[in-house]
Structure formats: C-alpha cells, structure tokens
Amino acid sequence: MTASAHLPKHGAVLFAKDLPGIAAFYGQLLGMTQTVTEKRLIVLESDTYQLVIHGIPTQVANRVNITVPPERRVDQSIKLVFPVQSLADARARAVALGGQVDAASAQFTSRGFTACDGYDPEGNVVQFREAAR
C-alpha cells in the first residue's frame, strides 16, 4: 500500500450563490453522490474526488448578479477540470442543468484526452475531459 492510499481524496471548494442549484448541476452531470448537506455546505463525492460547494455570505450574494444564460467568469484565476465518459453526453445534459459544454468544434485533444470548456449555472468556467479516442 502506498503512502497516498492514506491521504484524503483530491478535491476542490467552489463558492456558490445558489448552493442547491450548483450541487444539482455537478452531481447530476458528473454522477457524484451528495454525502453532506448542511445549511451553507454541500459535499459531492466520487470514488476519487470530493467537491465541496460552499455558500457565499448573503451580503456578498446580494451583490452577485447571475444572468440567464450565465455570463462566463473568464477572469477567474482557476478552472475546475472533471472527467466525463462522453463529451457529447455532457454537452446534451449540461444545458438542461443550467450550464453549457461548448460545441464540438471547440474541443481539442492532448496528452491522451479530448477536452472542451463550458460553464456551470453561475458562469464558472469548467473543463470537461473524456479519454481520447
């Protein structure tokens, strides 16, 4: 057994205005299980990854305007990356969940995967990756 077997899962913390909506987007699109539900926190998990969705304080949330469709937050200093079985399937499902995976023409292949950017219902830019064919 390696030393990393005793470490916690890889993960990220995402701050959100609409805690249940963002949790539904990632949970349903990525097939993650909701393991913790608290007033200001929802935890989604897969076998190898943990996504903590943390509510932003009300005074901050009141200043955040989420448009429909959401405006991409392209000036962020981080982009989440998630594996999916199929970019085409993720593309079809993301819209129904309030986000988007960009058109197939925007995909690129590199280092054994094919990737495509998109965004979640609050405009956070996300990259989705499938195994290269």
Image (tube, grey):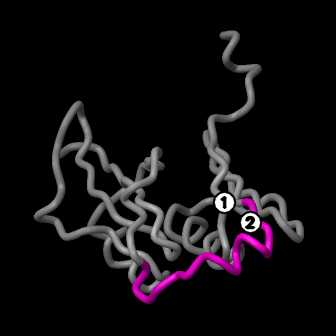
**Of residues 97 and 46, the one drawn nearer to the viewer in this rendering:** 97
* Residue under the image location 47 percent in, 86 percent down: 67
Residue that badge 1 annotates:
15
Q: Which amino acid does label 2 sit on?
A: Ile
**Is 10 rendered above or below residue 107?**
above
Q: Residue furthest left?
A: 105
Query: Contact (CB < 8 A) between labels 1 and 2?
Result: yes
The relative height of residue 58 versus residue 126 in the rendered view (above or below) is: below
Mark pair 1, 2: CA separation:
6 Å
In this rendering, position of residue 27 left or right of residue 127: right
> Going by the image, does 96 lie left or right of 41?
left
Q: Is residue 117 above or below residue 109?
A: below
State which quadrant residue 65 falls in.
Answer: bottom right
Q: What residue type is labelled 1?
A: Phe
Q: Residue furthest right?
A: 38
Main SS class of the magenta portion in the image: loop
Mark nearer the N terminus (1 vs 2): 1
